[in-house]
Amino acid sequence: MAAADLLRPALLAAARSPRMERTVSRIPVTKGLVDRFVAGETEDQAVAATTDVLGSGRYVSIDYLGEDTTDLGQASGTVSHYLTLLSSLAHRAPATDSGGRPRSIEVSLKLSALGQCLPRDGHNVALENAHKICTAAEEAGVWVTVDAEDHTTTDSTLSIVGELREDFPTLGTVLQAYLKRTEADCRDLSGPGSRIRLCKGAYKEPASVAYQGKPAVDEAYLQCLRVLMNGEGYPMVASHDPAMVEAALAQAKATGRTTDEFEVQMLHGIRDTEQLRLVEQQQHVRVYLPYGEQWYGYFMRRLAERPANLAFFLRSLTST
Ligand code: FAD
């Protein structure tokens, strides 16, 4: 087994450990590496980064960082941050529907940051909070997509998305190819008007529910991609993997999709040159742009994805 495969589960477990969070956050050099992946801590910084991304011809999906909230006040605080952000974005996004063209600005939400895992009535609290954000986003001309978290939340997340789509039909959702259920979810959810972001999946999941190891996950991704590209919705191909992106472009061509009928998505700070190359080829590319103070879980998942990121982090530690 490669060293990366051995390290990944440990890093993903650490991503959910408050003790590790306190330790890693106190290390001075951490901040420098965090800045590569996170666009700042405030709404003003997120809006400035959004302006840069849009200026380069790319689209954007902005995420206010935070997850696994077990405090009602904190969930309401997250809603307030999104509402502040959306009011700043209102004059930048097209005021009316873009007439079938993709919207250039989107926000991404994690339902666990909106109260989904509260012990009492978490499902309804998250639904109500997400509804407030979707209402403000609709007024601002901004799309919304609901992120996917660990597999224990998938049923609740897809059910909340289904309820919200009755009022907000353009609401998008994320499906994770590593989950064995996802090919069936792709079939169920790729109807007209749907927007599905397909990613490989970033959490530590047991073999009972998720494919393990890159070859199996890649194969599942390609199979899900085929389902989405042959479906009637708008596939959002979220991957930095050249093989996945190439397959998406080939399948879009084979299924007769125009460039307005799907998009490629990558994370802020990863494969920037490739993002711009795709834009030059007239491809829609959306950058997932996280901001906020609660960067720890997001940052650790980025370290887990790529041993080189971890090696860089460790080298920085030893050179201080
Ligand atoms: P991999 O096989 O992991 O990587 C392929 C190549 O991409 C690597 O060789 C490397 O060159 C580059 N690369 C990948 N990751 C990194 C990195 N961290 N740093 C530097 N280079 C890297 N996951 C979820 O579980 N839920 C979500 O809601 C979710 N939303 C996402 C939204 C977007 C727009 C994207 C791009 C990813 C999202 N993810 C989400 C993360 C995703 O599940 C994967 O963990 C992540 O994208 C790595 O998989 P990959 O497809 O890039 O391929």
Image (cartoon, rainbow, N blue to C red):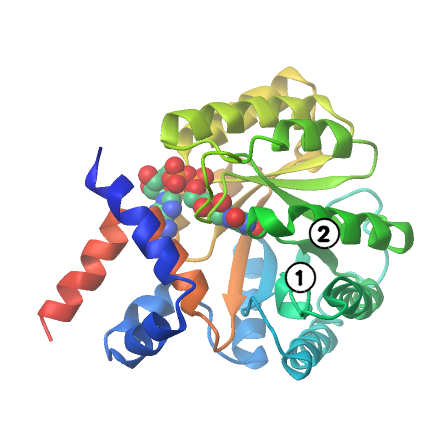
Tag 2 near tag 1, CB within 8 Å: yes
Q: Residue 131's image quarter? A: bottom right
Q: Amino acid at mark 1?
A: Leu
Name the residue carrying label 2: 156
In the depicted structure, whether residue 196 falls above or below residue 163: above
Frontmost residue, 20 versus 103:
20
Sequence-wise, the earlier of marks 2 and 1 is 1
What numbered label is drawn on residue 136?
none
Residue that numbered label 1 is attached to:
111
Q: Nearer the viewer, mark 2 or mark 1?
A: 2
- The residue sitting at the right extreme is 167
Say which element carries label 2: helix
Q: Position of residue 258 (x, y in %)?
A: 69, 29
> Can you tell me which quadrant of the image ligand 1 is in?
top left
Residue at 54% over, 69% down:
65
Q: Give the side of residue 16 with respect to residue 158, left or right.
A: left
Residue 150: x and y, percent? 55, 51
- Whether residue 57 is visible, yes or no, is no
User: Looking at the image, which is closer to me, 272 or 4?
Assistant: 4
